[in-house]
Amino acid sequence: MRDEVQDYYGKHLSGSDDLQTNACCDQTPPEHLKPLLTRLHDEVISRYYGCGLVAPAALEGARVLDLGCGSGRDAYLLSALVGERGSVVGVDMTEEQLAVARRHQDFHRDQFGHGRSNVMFLKGFIEELDQLDLEPGGFDVVVSNCVINLSTDKAKVLTDLKRLLKPGGEFYFSDVYADRRVPAALTRDPVLYGECLSGALYWNDFLNLSKDCGFADPRLVESRRLTIDNPAIEAKLGDIRFYSATYRLFNLDGLEPACEDYGQAVVYKGTVAEQPHGFLLDGHHYLPTGKVFPVCGNSWRMLAESRFRSHFDYIGDFSTHYGIFQDCGLNPPFNDTTPSSGGGCC
């Protein structure tokens, strides 16, 4: 199947208009990213096949790895956000896509006013990151955009990228998920697989896989129901529902399996440039600037032991345990509600 996917994206697709479904479709970007997107090369944009946005906050000076970078749209956007002190490494298995990305390095260096190109591209499989010359613990952030579902060994990908992340680093990625396990017969369909559908994980299998690979508390940032808009493919898929979802997985050992209350709170200073009025940690945690916000021990650590540390004041410690936060159960994570700005953890 990996060869089929490589051929699909390298030879079958010449642009996003060649896709047969709406699974790999872009979202409306936030206002602070729109000016940067207009400065990307047209050819790079035309060969984009992502399903979400993978531009987390506070990236200035960061070292970022982009898995399945394709023609380089996200890599070049991220290169503007990390600045000249930061760097971006893109990895992709498709030579045709990498050729597009590489021929526009000088263009984007000039567009963003960098004295040097802060982007490099490597050919390789995301299941074989250990075979590339990448420094263990060398990345602040790893991103991917509608790529993990295409992998034939998702556990290997997660295990390798955990090794590549710094302590407190994060994997921030958008991907396609199913509301149930996709039947084996459909996973052998090269078109369904290439369209980012039949390789999608059942959402609960993904959560358990992440925990098995060392990411104990996956956080859902946002999600939306996908439409297929292709009657023939919809007939094959039957009642399976698909979602585009963005998760963040922090590389923090010792995170707890539940939302435990230690009487802790944080106060966001409003100092992340793109989020002056409040900080979005995930779909349950929108932290308004200046407000004392109770958090569980895991949320505390995600802020205090990551690149976000300096943007918060911290109240309390781990000396006293008060049990679990109410309503912190295991339910299907996808919904259409907006993040809560209340004082509860979940």
Image (tube, rainbow, N blue to C red):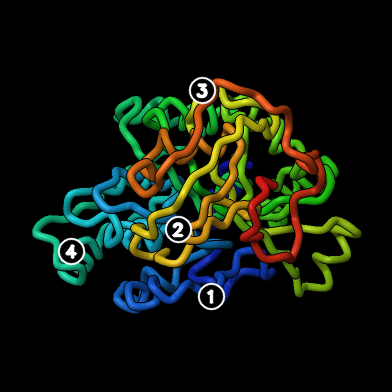
Q: Distance between the residues labelled 1 and 3?
A: 35 Å
Mark nearest the camera among 3 and 2 is 2
Residue that label 1 marks: 28
Residue 255 occupies quadrant:
top right
Of the residues under marks 2 and 1, which one precedes in the sequence?
A: 1
Q: Which amino acid does label 3 sit on?
A: Asp
Q: How far apart are marks 3 and 4 (CA)?
A: 37 Å
Q: Is residue 127 above or below residue 111?
A: above
Label 2: which secondary element: loop
Q: Which mark is residue 109?
A: 4
Disc 3: CA contacts within 10 A as few (<14), some (14-19) or many (>=20): few
Residue 251 visible in the current orientation: yes
Tell whether 46 sits left or right of 82: right
Label 3: which secondary element: loop
Q: Pointer 2 and pointer 4: residues touching (CB < 8 Å)? A: no
Image location of residue 101, percent across then percent down: 32, 59
Residue that label 3 marks: 253
Q: Residue at x 46, y 38 (%)?
A: 125
Disc 2: CA contacts within 10 A as few (<14), some (14-19) or many (>=20): some
Tell whether 247 sits left or right of 235: left
Residue 275 occupies quadrant:
bottom left
Q: Which mark is residue 290?
A: 2
Q: What residue type is labelled 4?
A: Arg
Mark nearest the camera among 1 and 3 is 3
Q: Distance between the residues labelled 1 and 4?
A: 25 Å
Mark nearest the camera among 2 and 4 is 2
Q: Residue at x 64, y 42 (%)?
A: 1
Q: What residue type is labelled 2?
A: Gly
